[in-house]
Image (tube, grey):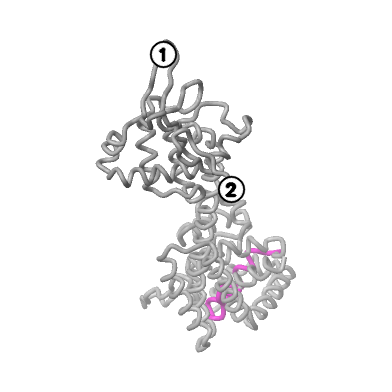
Amino acid sequence: MEYTPISPFMRPISHAHLRVIERPEASVPVKPVNKWELLRELSKAQAAFGVSERDLTVLQGLLSFFPDDALGGNTEMVVFPSNKAICERLNGMPCSTMRRHLARLVEAGLLMRRDSPNGKRYVRKRGEERVAFGFDLSPLYCRAEEIARAAEAVREAEDRVRRLREVVSLMRRDLAALAEFGDEVQPGLCLWDELRDTAALIARALRRKLSLEDLSVYRTELETLLDRARNVIDGPETEEMNTNDVHFERHHHNSNKESKDLEPALKKGGAAAGAPKADPCEPEADVEEPDTRRVPKIPLHLVIASCPSLKTFYQGDIRHWHQLFDAACHVRPAMGISVSAWEEAQRCMGPEQASIVVVAMLERFADIRSPGGYLRALTSKAAAGEFSCGPMVMALIGRRSAA
């Protein structure tokens, strides 16, 4: 038969209480602990100690009877309010409910009963000696370090959930944007509908409070779909772009004079013909056409992720397209791109797409021998309707994934 220790007033002593009594001296806090900060830490880690919010409300009431703000030191940590006084302090909580919560706190090893011979709670003074009977708060003080560690573990778990939730949210937005971009590049594929449906379902799921396991499942699903979408988009068109990139780089390296004198040659040709040659990127002088360029469908987050070198040369935040444009204007002179080439790229591509091209070129700057000529070549393709910056970004992502 198992022996159950009892208190002097014949009440059972919990095993959690015994563990506190047997706790080695080294684990006891060496300095006083603020009782309210300790209560907040316990509130954060309440699940680890098996107590509820109502239990902590009763504990808060008991702590309010302790005159000092700090537990510990040489002060005796015994409070001795009557049941009536405790219930009044707890805004009229029924006495039976209060006793039930007190029993849970004692069972959890956060309180200890110090019973008098008649079961009453009081303090007796004999000269300088003081003997109190009531609820001893020393177990709570002795477990302060344990409570702090448990609270920190809860915060770390919450932080992991918060970070993973943010990652899943960003991946969902990328998935939706890739669906729109892919439908424009390769229309008619069922994959884009699947991506849209999954993005919508996960958006509804993110309205709820999800566990770490649920978020991990969504992240895996999103990673799979993003890889599928990138493999489809990063297909023959990207291979053609990579081949053309190498061709353009070699062409401008071997034809420095042509790339440097591109605009003067056009002007001379126009003068020989008797009239200036029209810029293919601009409309007729007397015909005003609306600007039909739109913000690129490729997600800005994806562009920034594929061009980490940009952070080295531009310290500002990039959360909107106008900030990416500002960053491109900042790095453009250092790359050796002339003002005329940059303005021409903006006219033919639009400022957003031109900014994407410049930051993508910065990522591959070591491989591009003539950045200004390379940008002009891409601008010419854009003027002919044969260029999209999407494959360029996807190729950078593929290179980072393979590295």
Asked if residue 102 can be seen in this view, the reply is yes
Res 27 → quadrant: top right
Left/right of residue 187 with respect to residue 265 in the rendered view: left
Left/right of residue 193 with respect to residue 398 in the rendered view: left
The CA distance from mark 1 to mark 2 is 39 Å
The magenta segment is 369-391
Q: Position of residue 28 (x, y in %)?
A: 58, 31
- For the point 62% across and 58% down, the residue is 308
In the picture of the structure, the residue carrying the numbered disc 1 is 126
Disc 2 element = loop
Left/right of residue 188 with respect to residue 292 in the rendered view: right
In the picture of the structure, the residue carrying the numbered disc 2 is 2
Within 10 Å of disc 1 (Cα), the crowding (few <14, some 14-19, many 20+) is few
Where is 390 relative to 150, above or below?
A: below
Q: Position of residue 325 (x, y in %)?
A: 49, 60
The amino acid type, in three-letter code, at marker 1 is Arg
Type of secondary structure dominating the magenta stretch: helix
Query: Of residues 172 and 210, which is closer to you in this image?
Result: 210
Where is 239 relative to 205, above or below?
A: below
- For the point 65% across and 61% down, the residue is 363
Disc 1 element = strand
Which residue sits furthest bottom?
188
Res 236 → quadrant: bottom right
Query: Of residues 7 and 30, which is closer to you in this image?
Result: 7
Q: Position of residue 185 (x, y in %)?
A: 53, 82
The amino acid type, in three-letter code, at marker 2 is Glu
